[in-house]
Image (spheres, helix red, strand yellow):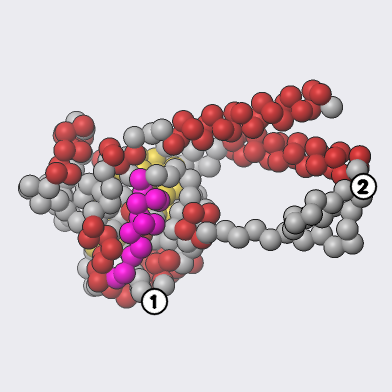
Amino acid sequence: MKTTSSVFSAAILLSAASAARAASDNQCFDFTPMSSVSNYLGATLDYSVADRICCHNHKFAEYRGYLAAPEVDFFGRLDPSVETVFYDSVCGLPLFIAPRGRTFDDFKKESLKHGWPSFRPEEMISENVIIHDDGRMESVCLSHLGHNLPTGGVDRYCIDLVCMAGEPLSAGDERNQILQYMHQEQIINATELNTTSYTSSAEQYSGKTSNATAIIISVAVVGLFLVVVAFVCCEKPGWKRKGDEIQVGSSETSTSIHEDDEENEIY
């Protein structure tokens, strides 16, 4: 039992270290989403969600279906007859052009099916977007965007609306400082983008998606935790803790977990 406890403790410490390292990342270069995100395309977006998801997060997402909420109505605000350019909510760099290589209805149908705006490789401004090996996506401005979740053997970028709701920066905007951290020749800013001639260099299937090793480790840790709980329960079959929603040894066992949708949705 001592060995099991040691392994379990090590796993917890490893998870805590990883979380601390992620939290220390200099997301968004210490900027916050632009204020115009709140009324993107005339919609009403929650600015606090944009700030939390885009600039203080690597894992979670706005709640599923947010794009179709009455106060948002994302697709109802787009012109179905033209391609739309979507910009980073923090630094205003162009991220996606859609629909491209498919119809507006296809773009809408896929996005509504999955619950978040969903883009394909030909629609990504590849110079301005980073896909990490585990599928996590962020802009070159270090704004969290979403995750790559391939469908049908082709990359599909599941993106948070609040993080692609920006607009091109004006010449005097202090956010232009962000671009000073980058190699200018490797990005395409809003004034340089020619939507007519632009062709994305994104791969149809990058192979960059959820990390199988991390999933296996997570499952192992959860399994180990359940073993420890089962051992404790077997040792003390009549144990109860007053005030808890879980009462081991009672005739009814129930759990009630309240989740904040904005913080706990994953793709």
Is the residue marked by circle 2 packed among few (<14), some (14-19), or many (20+) residues within 10 Å? few
Residue 50 lies in the magenta-colored region: yes
Q: Secondary structure at mark 1?
A: loop
Q: Secondary structure at mark 2?
A: loop
Q: Quadrant of residue 132?
A: top left
Front-lying residue, 70 or 106: 70
Q: Which mark is residue 70?
A: 1
Residue pictured at 35% horizontal, 51% vertical: 51
Q: Position of residue 129 (x, y in %)?
A: 31, 43
Front-lying residue, 104 or 187: 187
Of callouts 2 and 1, the N-terminal one: 1
Q: Quadrant of residue 130?
A: top left
| Number of numbered discs overlaid on the protein picture | 2
**Start-end of magenta stretch:** 43-55
Residue pictured at 49% horizontal, 63% vertical: 64
Q: Which mark is residue 106?
A: none
Residue bearing mark 2? 237
Find out whether the residues at labels 2 and 1 contact each other: C-beta distance under 8 Å.
Answer: no
Residue 45 visible to an observer of this rendering: yes
Q: Answer above or below: position of 85 versus 227.
A: below
Residue pictured at 51% horizontal, 60% vertical: 261
- What secondary structure is the magenta-colored segment mainly? helix
